[in-house]
C-alpha cells in the first residue's frame, strides 16, 4: 500500500473541505473493498477521508412510508433492524446474506452502492425499489445513479448521505451466490407497488439492470407464466469461470419465476 | 498519527504510519501474536478480533481507524492462566490441528454466541462463513461451539 494522508472529520463540511484539499482523495467507509484494492495498488489515493465519525451518515428511520438508511449504516445493522425487518424484510434478508459476519460488521450500504460492483447485492435493491440517493450535493433518482461497470453518476467530491426507499406492498430478493465470496452470480430483486412492478437483476451483466419488458407484463398479470411468454431479450450477459452467459440467462428466468411464486403465496 | 485505544482492557497510545493495518499493529507494535494473518485478503478470518465488541477482520482495517476504540484479541478472552470456556471447549473437542485458524475461529464463535446464545448447527456453520480451516474439516469446531452454547 502506498502512503496517504488520513482524516476522520466529524461533519460533512469538514469532510468536503478535507477531500478538496488534496488532488486525489477518496472517501473511506467500511474499507472492505477500498483497503484490499489499495493493498493491490489498484488504488493509490493521496488522502483518505474516513466517514466513520460523521453521525449524520448513520442510522435507520421510517417516515411517510419512506425507509431511510444512512450511507454509513453497516450491513449487520440493516439485517437486524426491526424497522427494516418489519417494513421491508427483503432488504433485511439481502443485507444478512452479504459476505460473512465480519464483512457485515464493517461494510456499509453507501460504500456498496458507490462502488457499484456488478455482483454486489444492494444495487439490485436500489433499482428494484423506488428509491432516491441523497448526496452531499443533490438527490439522484435510482434510475440515474448506476452508470455501467463500477461507475456511478456521483461527482468525485460528492458523497452519499442516505438512501430513501419507498416501501412496497411486497418484495423479495433471491441470490444464487458464488459459494466462495457470496457475491451474486445472479441476484433478483422483485417488488410490487400499487402502481408498478419492478424487477432488477445483479451479478449477471457489467452493471445491475431492470427488466422493463417483464415489469409491464407482470403488473397486469402477476404470474410466472408471463416470464415464459415475454420476450425480454437480455443480451451481453457475463461469461466467466463461475458461470457462462447461457447459464446466467437460465438462472435469471428460473429465479424470477421462483420469486413470483414465493410472493404469490405471501 | 498517534492513536490511543484500549486493547484487552489496557490503554495504549502509539505512533503509527497511516497505512499500517490493524492486524500488523496488533502483532508487530503490540507484540500480541495470537492474532494471525493467513491470507491478508479478507478471506480466511485468521485475523478476527473484536472492535467495540463486534467481530471484524483486522487485516482489512487501518490501525488509525481504530483510534479511540476498544479491541479484544484472543489473548484477552481470559485474564487468568485458565482458558476461557470457548478455548477450553476447543481443546476438549479436538477442534484444532495446526491451530493457525484457531484464534480467528474462536473470536468469531464468541461473537456468534454473544448475539445468538442458542444457535442451531446451521447458524453456527453460517457464522463461520468468513473463517477458513485447512485442517479439521470443521466438524469438531462446530461441536465445540455447540457444546459451549449448551453449557451456557
Ligand atoms: C470477503 C468479502 C465478501 C463480500 N461479499 C459480498 C457480497 O456477498 N455481496 C456484496 O454485495 N458485497 C460483498 N462484499 C462487499 C462489501 O459488502 C462492502 O459493501 C463493499 O466492500 C463496499 O462497502 P464499504 O463500506 O466497505 O466501502 P469502502 O471499501 O470503504 O469504499 C468503497 C468505495 O466507495 C466509496 N465510498 C464509500 N462510501 C461512500 C459514500 N458515502 N459516498 C460516496 N462514496 C463512497 C469509496 O471511496 C470507495 O471508492 C464483500 C467484501 C468482502 C471483503
Ligand atoms: S488474514 Fe485477514 S482475513 Fe485472512
Ligand atoms: S486447525 Fe489448521 S487451519 Fe484450522
Image: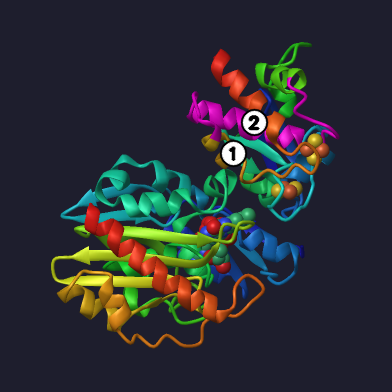
Q: Is residue B110 magenta?
A: yes
The residue beneath circle 1 is B125
On the rendered image, what quadrant is the N terminus of chain A found in? bottom right
Q: Does the magenta stretch include residue A186?
A: no
Q: What stretch is highlighted in magenta?
A: B93-121
The disc, 1 or 2, on the residue closer to the chain's N-terminal end is: 1
In depth, the one of B71 and A91 nearer the eye is A91
- Seen in the image, is A150 located left or right of residue B28? left
The structure residue drawn at horizontal position 79% and vertical position 47%, both measured from the top left corner, is B38
The structure residue drawn at horizontal position 53% and vertical position 45%, both measured from the top left corner, is A105
x%, y% of residue B51? 60, 36
In depth, the one of A97 and B146 nearer the eye is B146
- Seen in the image, is B140 located left or right of residue A84? right
Cβ atoms at labels 1 and 2 below 8 Å apart: yes
Q: Distance between the residues labelled 1 and 2?
A: 7 Å
- Residue A115 versus residue B94 in the image, above or below: below
Q: Mark 2 lies on which chain?
A: B
x%, y% of residue B6? 65, 29
The answer to whether residue A133 is seen in the rendering is no
Residue at mark 1 shares a chain with residue at mark 2: yes
Q: How crowded is mark 1: few (under 14 residues within 10 Å), some or many (20 or more)?
A: some
The residue beneath circle 2 is B142
- Residue A98 versus residue A205 in the image, above or below: above
Amino acid at each position: 500500500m502506498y502512503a496517504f494522508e488520513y482524516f476522520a472529520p466529524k461533519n460533512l463540511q469538514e469532510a468536503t473541505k478535507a477531500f478538496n484539499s488534496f488532488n486525489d482523495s477518496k472517501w473511506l467507509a467500511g474499507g472492505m473493498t477500498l483497503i484490499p484494492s489499495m493493498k493491490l495498488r489498484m488504488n493509490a489515493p493521496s488522502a483518505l477521508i474516513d466517514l466513520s465519525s460523521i453521525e449524520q451518515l448513520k442510522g435507520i428511520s421510517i417516515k411517510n412510508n419512506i425507509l431511510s438508511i444512512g450511507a454509513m449504516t453497516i450491513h449487520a445493522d440493516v439485517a437486524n433492524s426491526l424497522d427494516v425487518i418489519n417494513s421491508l424484510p427483503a432488504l433485511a434478508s439481502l443485507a444478512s446474506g452479504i459476505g460473512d459476519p465480519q464483512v457485515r460488521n464493517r461494510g456499509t450500504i453507501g460504500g456498496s452502492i458507490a462502488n457499484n460492483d456488478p455482483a454486489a447485492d444492494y444495487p439490485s435493491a436500489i433499482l428494484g425499489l423506488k428509491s432516491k440517493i441523497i448526496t452531499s450535493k443533490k438527490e439522484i433518482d435510482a434510475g440515474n445513479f448506476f452508470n455501467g461497470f463500477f461507475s456511478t453518476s456521483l461527482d468525485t467530491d460528492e458523497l452519499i448521505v442516505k438512501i430513501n426507499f419507498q416501501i412496497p406492498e411486497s418484495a423479495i430478493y433471491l441470490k444464487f451466490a458464488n459459494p466462495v465470496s457470496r457475491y451474486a452470480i445472479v441476484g433478483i430483486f422483485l417488488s410490487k407497488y400499487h402502481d408498478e412492478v419492478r424487477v432488477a437483476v445483479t451479478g449477471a451483466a457489467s452493471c445491475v439492470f431492470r427488466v422493463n419488458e417483464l415489469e409491464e407484463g407482470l403488473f397486469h398479470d402477476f404470474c410466472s407464466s408471463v416470464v415464459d411468454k415475454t420476450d425480454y431479450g437480455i443480451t451481453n450477459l457475463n461469461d466467466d469461470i463461475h458461470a457462462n452467459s447461457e447459464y446466467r440467462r437460465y438462472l435469471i428466468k428460473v429465479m424470477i419465476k421462483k420469486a413470483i411464486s414465493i410472493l404469490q403465496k405471501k | 498519527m498517534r492513536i490511543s485505544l484500549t486493547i484487552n482492557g489496557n490503554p495504549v497510545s502509539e505512533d503509527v504510519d497511516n497505512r499500517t493495518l490493524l492486524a500488523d499493529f496488533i502483532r508487530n507494535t503490540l507484540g500480541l501474536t495470537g492474532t494471525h494473518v493467513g491470507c491478508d485478503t479478507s478471506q480466511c478470518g485468521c485475523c478476527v478480533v473484536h472492535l467495540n465488541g463486534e467481530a471484524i477482520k483486522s487485516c482489512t482495517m487501518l490501525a488509525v481507524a481504530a483510534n479511540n476504540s476498544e479491541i479484544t484479541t484472543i489473548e484477552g478472552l481470559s485474564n487468568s492462566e485458565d482458558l476461557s470456556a470457548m478455548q477450553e471447549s476447543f481443546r476438549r473437542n479436538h477442534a484444532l490441528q495446526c491451530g493457525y485458524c484457531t484464534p480467528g475461529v474462536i473470536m468469531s464463535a464468541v461473537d456468534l454466541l454473544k448475539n445468538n446464545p442458542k444457535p442451531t448447527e446451521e447458524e453456527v456453520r453460517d457464522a463461520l462463513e468468513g473463517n477458513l480451516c485447512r485442517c479439521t474439516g470443521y466438524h469438531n469446531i462446530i461441536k465445540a461451539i455447540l457444546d459451549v452454547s449448551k453449557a451456557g
